[in-house]
Image (cartoon, helix red, strand yellow):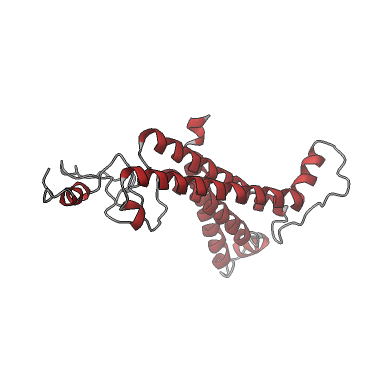
Amino acid sequence: MLKVLDHIEEWLITFLMGAATLIIFVSVVHRYGSGLSIPGVQDWLLSLHFGWAQELTIIMFVWMAKFGAAYGVRTGIHVGVDVLINRLSDANRAKFVVIGLGAGALFTGIVGTLGLTFVLENGAHYQFLTWFGMDVGDLYEGPTTPDLEWPTWIVYSAIPLGSYLMCFRFLQVMVSFIRTGELPHHDHGHVDGIDEEHLPVDANYLDMGDNLHPHDLKHKQFGENRNKGRDDGQGGKP
């Protein structure tokens, strides 16, 4: 189960991105093709209705954004200003990193709970009871989208699902950091599917080279030991 959960963001984002691209392409071809005076073909194209394409792609991009945020937490690609934290000692740095990850989990958990409440009140509760043949009472059926005429609670479900997944990722990263002292790193220069040349022996590919990511306790940044050496009066030499 965890193996599936470890890649659910990539699978969902890949599917949504590919489907949205295909829908947009077909919609644009249909729009321009409908203006061509080709006997038979023009009448057939005009009989097709693609007014829903824009609305569906917008919904897809909303879902991509929410689950992409969870992917960013897991892979460490979110950017933040960590100049102060990176200058702290290892012990103090570890405390603030755990506090930051815990705050992220708390915030996304609250957003997910509020989103779930909104989705239930927006028609999901009514729909669930209807599916199970139970009495819906005075529950609100909920509105539908203008073009697709889908229940809007399906669209808004991206908020609780994506937020709860982000909360889980924050907790997952926090537990891993407490156990190993390592944070997820992302090589911004790496492109999947392209073979890379071998790095020099003394190159640390986990070095971010900036203060936009918190430095963990396992991988030392370039110059970090040298700076500590100066503080110890050793002139930067081991």
- Name the foreground residue: 35 vs 61: 61
Please provide percent x and percent y for residue 6: 47, 36
Rendering coords of residue 51 (x, y %): 65, 62
Residue 158 seen: no
**The one of 216 and 193 positioned closer to us in this rendering:** 216
Q: Position of residue 62 (x, y in %)?
A: 57, 55
How many numbered discs, if any? 0
**What residue sits 32% from the left and 56% below the top?**
211
Left or right of 59: which side holds 183? Answer: left
Q: Residue furthest top?
A: 1
Residue 32 position (above or below residue 77): below
In this view, the residue farthest toward the front is: 233
> Which quarter of the picture shows residue 212?
bottom left
- Could you say where residue 172 lies in the image, as x and y percent from the top left? 47, 38
Viewer-side residue, 176 vs 97? 97
For the C terminus, the quadrant is top left
Give the quarter of the image for residue 80.
Answer: bottom left
Seen from the viewer's position, the closer of residues 111 and 152 is 111
Q: In this view, does 91 lie to the left or right of 32?
A: left
Answer yes or no: is residue 21 visible.
yes
Q: Which residue is drawn at 74% across and 56% down?
A: 144
